[in-house]
Amino acid sequence: MANNNLYSQKILKIFGNPKNFGELKNPDSVGKVGNIRCGDEMWLYLRVGHKNGLDFIKNIKIKTFGCVAAIATSSVVVDLARGKTFNEALKIDPNKVMIKTGPLPKVKIHCSMLATDALIDAIYDYLSKNKKPISSELETLHKKIALKNKLLLKKFGL
């Protein structure tokens, strides 16, 4: 059970009514991330549209298993990313997430990072599956996320 003294009313409100939770049937891509310390896991599903030669996030859903902060931050990432081009979505960082959620307890800031990692991983998944150009910055971010995921799987013997 969450200690409500840790969380602001804003975070608790988002947690109590998260948006766009669940899976998309036949998504164009999926981002999968987890945190080795707390065990939070997120799967972010994208449906991609195309306009004026650019890929954009037409539909997005997330499935999060975790604490109040994990659920609230992942809900915010979904709201921030919907309708954005990939370049715009990749500019969503933990600070932008925390502006929307309000302050997180220091021990929960990693949840905002995990939520943005799920978005990065889904965009990378789409670009790589569709043999589209991947920037060196996105490649570096993906490698860091993949390493974290590998450590998580190893920790739980998966």
Image (tube, rainbow, N blue to C red):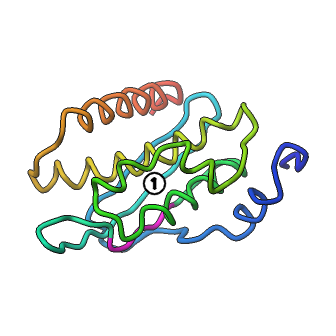
Compared to 135, does 86 lie above or below? below
- Give the residue type that dot 1 points to: Trp
Compared to 68, does 153 lie above or below? above
Count how many numbered circles sit on residues in the image. 1
Q: Which residue is mark 1?
A: 43
> Could you tell me residue 114's position as x and y percent?
52, 41
> Could you tell me residue 73's position as x and y percent?
60, 52
> Could you tell me residue 71's position as x and y percent?
64, 55
At x 34%, y 46%, the residue is 121
- Mark 1, other Cα within 10 Å: few <14 / some 14–19 / many ≥20: many
Q: Is residue 29 left or right of residue 40?
A: left
Q: Which quadrant holds the C terminus?
A: top left
The segment highlighted magenta reads 58-62
Q: Is residue 59 left or right of residue 135?
A: right
Compared to 88, does 133 lie above or below? above
> Could you tell me residue 27's position as x and y percent?
31, 68
At x 70%, y 48%, the residue is 67
SS for callout 1 = strand
Quadrant of res 148: top left
Does the segment drawn in magenta span residue 42? no
